[in-house]
Structures are given as structure tokens and as C-alpha cells.
């Protein structure tokens, strides 16, 4: 009896792993099998991957481009803002941080509706990739700000800056020579989070995209609805190959930033 | 330039962006909800129209069920992984956090592979077992992306529990289940409430999974989507969005006040 109650946590853990892992393995296999319904005995092939490339390479490149543009925007908007918030800890800063974090709490669908109603009539903007970019920046910005802010809050910024100021460095110089180097672990963790989330973003993008502007996840939804299982699986496999290394790098960088803060 | 001016300059780009693409659009959304034929009574209409009310109830029930299941599974697995060091532990942990980066559509596809018409369960069991497109399929999909989020919150809290507390209880003769009830769960309570709020809010707002499973069951995000795209009922879509956004925001505010951080909301 004792051994059974003792092994329950292990069994639950393993079952949860199976539940999460089995469909991933299925999708990898289906993307590489000649005919999924006849099983592995029909042979392995890369032709489905080739078909995905022919059909969807445009959406893959658009997603990579959007992720990089999103990273640039969150760096420019987020890093200086995190510094300002770290220099003025107080009620106003808390409220501002809480407000820019709203896109984490409000479902992407609601945010997309809000953007569409305000800017949807400006056709030039509506049809441009920067419209999707706005959504991605909105959603990823709080991650960058918080990641940088938590690192800056853990170091004695004031003393460092006073030291530099006494040597004659002006505020801009201090930001570049003192703040940015010290915040680098947080910037790196934030950057990897931003890229990972941008590449996988669907809820906002689905509402904001146009037929000519399909991102990777929008293409995935498209393939799930209209392609045979092998093509959908091969496309999912391509997505996994892109996202899993990013996720691992992101977790590594976040753990590293946490260690440095202690 | 004084340091004070420089700090303000640092905030300026973020301020402009947030005003233009967050504050004003959200304000517009709230106004748009009152611009229908019903005016502001549209919020009353949500409660009086059976279709919306059933949807609301259905979404809450599924989300509650997912929250309960994810808490039970992830707390058990999280405590197991925190207290045991063994070969392959890191691999198990990686598997359990993998879905963090999956969009809701991919999670939906995972459930189709498990329980769809051509799914694994239908293939290995005699008879016709298809559950991907039912409430149960939706439940499994939400569970799929909730397990990692709850797990990370629980594990972060469990690592901070002083092992001496448990040892003290053991030397005083407490059986294992009493240790769990009297020592571990009270110590984990804030983290569990926070993780529960995150799981519930994420499930309430999840769109991609329901969209892929294209189920007949109405959940709130799907109804918002159809009101907007098919019925072109902008006011109702806006009003439902405001209700949904308020609910998830308040829940995550509670979660944040109880534990340090929120895990990415997606799905």
C-alpha cells in the first residue's frame, strides 16, 4: 500500500509527459511518412516538407521578418522605458507598468478588435505588414520591459550612475556605458522571449492579417483546415524545428538573468 | 539636459506607442460597445439572451474544469520533480514545459492527432472513438497548454519551501498524506491560487485551440469572432470583448498580487 501511494506522483508525472509528448511525436512522424494512414511501413519521405516549403515559405519568411522587426521595436521602446521606470520607482511607475502589461491579460482577440475598429479604415496601414507588427509589439513589449526592469532593480543603479556622473559623464553617456551593459542579461532574456512569442503569435495575428499577409501560425491554421494530414504535420514539424531551440535558449537566458540578479 | 529630462525622454517612445495603439483603441472598443441599437443596455442584453448566457456559462464551466485538472496534475508533478533528483529529470521537465511556446492552433492540432477522425485513439481502439471536436476535446486542448504554466508557478514556490518543516512533521510522526495537507499545501496556497487564476484566465480567452477544433460548442472567444466576422454585429462583439477582457484582467491582477509574476498568456 505504501509503495502505491508513493509511486502515484511518479505515475501522474509520466502520464502528463505522455499526454504532451505523444501528439508531438505523432506529428513529427506523420510529417515524414509517405502515407500516414498506412503507417510507417509506407516509407519515410521529405517530400511533404518540400511541399510545405513550396506552399508556405513566404509565410515562414514573413514571420521571421516580423519577429526581427518586433525585436527592434521592443528594444527601442522597452529598454529606455525600463531604465526610466527603474530610476523612478513609485506609484506612477507601477501604474504605467501595469497598463503596458494589459495585453498579457486581455485576450488577443479583444485587442485585435480594438485595433481594427480604430485603424481598420486606413487601407494603406491595414494592408501593410506593419499593422500585424503593431499587434506583435503590443503583446511582447511587457516581456521586454519586465525582463530588463527586474535586472535593473536588482543592481545599485544609483551608486553606479553617481560614480559615472562625478567623472563627468552626461545622462546619455551613462545610459550607454553603465545601464545597457549592466542590463544585458535582462535584455538577452527579453529579446529571446520576444522573438519566440512573435513567431508563435496567432490570436491577434489571425484578426489582423490579410489574405496576402500570412504569418507562420496563420499558415498553420490554414493547413489544418484545408491540407491533408501529412502536409499539416510537416508544416508543424517545420514550426517545431524553429520554436523549440528558441524556447530552450529563452529558458536558459531567463535562468541566467535570475542567477545574476541574486 | 538634466537627468530628469533624460529619464522623461526615455519614456517618451513607449508613452506615444502605448497611447496610440493601446489606450485609444481600448477606449474606442468600449465606446463601440455602446453604439449599437441597444445602446449601453447591450450589457443587459448579454444576460438576457439565452445564447450568450449559455456561452458564458459554458466557457466558465470548461475553464473551471481545466483549472482544477491542471492544478491537480501540475502540483503533483511539480512536487515530484522538486523533491526528487534522478536521471532524466531534466528531460521530463523539458517535455512538460515544451507547450509554452505553442500557439493555440498547434495545441488544437495536437488534440486532433490524439482524438480526431484519423487520431491515435480512434486507430488503436475498436469502434469509432472521436472526441477531438467535443467539449472533452476542448478540455484536453486547454489542459495541454495549462499544465506547463501551472507547473512553473508551483515549482518556483515549492523550491522555496524549507525542507526542515517537512522533516519536523515527519519526526513528530505525521503520515505522508498529513504532511501534504498540513505542511505543503498551506505553504503552496498563494502559488496555487495565482496559478489557478492564470489557468482560468488563459482558458477563458483561448481562441486558437477552439478555432482549430472548430467545435459546435460555443465558447466566448469563438462567439466574439463569429459576431464580428459573420454577423458583423460590431457592438455585441465589442461588448463581449470588454466583458471577457475585464474578467481575465481582474483575475490576473489577483494572481500577480499573490505571486511574483505571470506566465505568458497565449493559447
Image (cartoon, coloured by chain):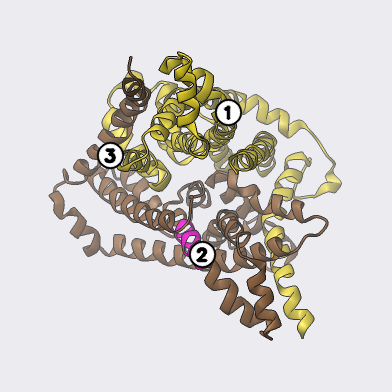
Chain colours: A yellow, B brown
Which region shows up in magenta?
B189-200
Chain identifier of the residue bearing label 2 in the image: B
Q: Position of residue B135 (x, y in %)?
A: 50, 63
User: Quick one: label 3 or label 2, which is nearer the N terminus?
Assistant: 3
In front: mark 1 or mark 2?
1
Q: In this figure, which residue is indicated by the disc labeled 2?
A: B192
Q: What residue appears at the point 23 percent right and 44 percent down from the top-left corner? A: B30
Chain identifier of the residue bearing label 1 in the image: A
Camera-side residue of B84 and B4 = B4
Q: Position of residue B100 (x, y in %)?
A: 59, 47
On residue B26, the disc is 3
Q: Are marks 3 and 2 in contact (CB under 8 Å)?
A: no
Q: In this figure, which residue is indicated by the disc labeled 1?
A: A184
In front: mark 3 or mark 2?
2
Taking the magenta stretch, the answer to whether it contains residue B197 is: yes
Q: Please tell me whether mark 2 sits on a helix, a strand or a loop.
A: helix
Q: Quadrant of residue B150?
A: bottom right
Same chain? Circles 3 and 2: yes
Taking the magenta stretch, the answer to whether it contains residue A118 is: no
Same chain? Circles 1 and 2: no
Q: Is residue B6 above or below residue A104?
A: above
Answer whether residue A7 is visible to the viewer in this image.
yes
Q: Quadrant of residue B180?
A: bottom right
Q: Please tell me whether mark 1 sits on a helix, a strand or a loop.
A: helix
Answer whether residue B128 is visible to the viewer in this image.
no
Relative horizontal placement of residue B55, taking residue B155 as reference (left or right): left
Question: Split into 4 quadrants, where in the image is the N terminus of chain B?
Answer: top left
Q: Position of residue A41 (x, y in %)?
A: 86, 47
Amino acid at each position: 500500500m505504501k509503495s502505491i501511494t508513493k509511486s502515484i506522483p511518479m505515475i501522474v508525472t509520466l502520464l502528463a509527459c505522455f499526454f504532451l509528448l505523444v501528439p508531438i511525436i505523432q506529428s513529427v512522424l506523420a510529417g515524414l511518412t509517405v502515407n500516414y494512414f498506412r503507417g510507417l511501413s509506407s516509407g519515410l519521405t521529405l517530400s511533404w516538407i518540400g511541399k510545405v516549403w513550396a506552399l508556405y515559405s513566404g509565410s515562414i519568411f514573413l514571420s521571421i521578418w516580423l519577429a526581427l522587426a518586433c525585436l527592434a521595436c521592443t528594444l527601442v521602446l522597452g529598454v529606455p522605458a525600463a531604465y526610466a521606470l527603474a530610476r523612478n520607482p513609485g506609484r506612477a511607475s507601477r501604474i504605467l507598468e501595469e497598463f503596458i502589461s494589459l495585453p498579457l491579460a486581455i485576450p488577443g482577440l479583444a485587442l485585435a478588435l480594438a485595433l481594427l475598429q480604430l485603424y481598420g479604415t486606413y487601407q494603406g496601414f491595414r494592408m501593410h505588414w506593419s499593422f500585424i507588427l503593431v499587434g506583435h509589439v503590443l503583446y511582447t513589449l511587457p516581456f521586454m520591459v519586465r525582463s530588463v526592469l527586474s535586472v535593473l532593480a536588482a543592481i545599485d543603479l544609483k551608486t553606479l550612475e553617481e560614480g559615472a556622473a562625478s567623472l563627468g559623464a552626461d545622462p546619455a553617456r551613462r545610459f550607454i556605458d553603465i545601464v545597457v551593459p549592466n542590463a544585458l542579461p535582462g535584455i538577452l532574456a527579453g529579446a529571446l522571449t520576444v522573438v519566440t512569442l512573435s513567431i508563435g503569435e496567432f490570436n491577434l495575428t489571425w484578426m489582423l492579417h490579410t489574405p496576402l499577409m500570412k504569418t507562420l501560425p496563420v499558415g498553420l491554421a490554414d493547413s489544418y483546415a484545408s491540407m491533408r494530414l501529412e502536409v499539416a504535420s510537416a508544416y508543424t514539424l517545420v514550426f517545431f524545428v524553429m520554436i523549440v531551440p528558441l524556447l530552450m535558449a529563452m529558458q536558459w537566458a531567463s535562468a541566467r538573468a535570475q542567477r545574476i540578479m541574486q | 539636459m538634466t537627468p530628469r529630462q533624460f529619464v522623461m525622454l526615455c519614456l517618451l517612445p513607449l508613452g506615444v506607442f502605448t497611447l496610440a495603439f493601446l489606450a485609444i483603441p481600448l477606449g474606442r472598443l468600449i465606446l463601440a460597445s455602446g453604439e449599437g441599437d441597444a445602446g449601453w443596455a447591450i450589457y443587459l442584453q448579454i444576460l438576457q439572451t439565452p445564447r450568450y448566457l449559455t456561452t458564458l456559462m459554458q466557457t466558465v464551466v470548461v475553464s473551471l474544469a481545466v483549472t482544477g485538472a491542471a492544478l491537480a496534475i501540475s502540483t503533483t508533478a511539480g512536487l515530484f520533480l522538486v523533491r526528487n533528483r534522478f536521471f532524466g529529470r531534466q528531460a521530463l521537465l523539458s517535455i512538460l514545459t515544451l507547450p509554452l511556446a505553442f500557439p493555440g492552433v498547434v495545441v488544437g492540432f495536437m488534440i486532433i492527432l490524439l482524438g480526431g477522425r484519423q487520431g491515435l485513439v480512434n486507430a488503436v481502439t475498436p469502434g469509432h472513438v472521436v472526441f477531438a471536436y467535443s467539449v472533452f476535446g476542448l478540455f484536453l486542448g486547454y489542459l495541454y497548454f495549462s499544465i506547463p504554466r501551472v507547473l512553473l508557478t508551483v515549482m518556483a514556490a515549492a523550491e522555496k519551501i524549507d525542507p526542515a518543516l517537512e522533516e519536523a512533521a515527519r519526526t513528530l510522526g505525521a503520515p505522508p498524506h498529513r504532511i501534504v495537507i498540513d505542511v505543503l499545501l498551506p505553504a503552496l496556497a498563494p502559488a496555487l491560487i495565482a496559478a489557478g487564476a492564470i489557468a482560468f484566465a488563459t482558458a477563458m480567452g483561448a481562441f486558437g485551440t477552439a478555432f482549430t477544433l472548430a467545435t459546435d460548442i460555443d465558447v466566448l472567444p469563438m462567439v466574439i469572432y463569429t459576431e464580428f466576422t459573420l454577423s458583423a454585429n460590431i457592438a455585441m462583439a465589442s461588448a463581449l470583448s470588454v466583458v471577457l477582457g475585464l474578467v481575465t484582467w481582474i483575475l490576473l491582477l489577483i494572481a500577480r498580487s499573490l505571486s511574483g509574476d505571470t506566465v505568458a498568456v497565449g493559447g
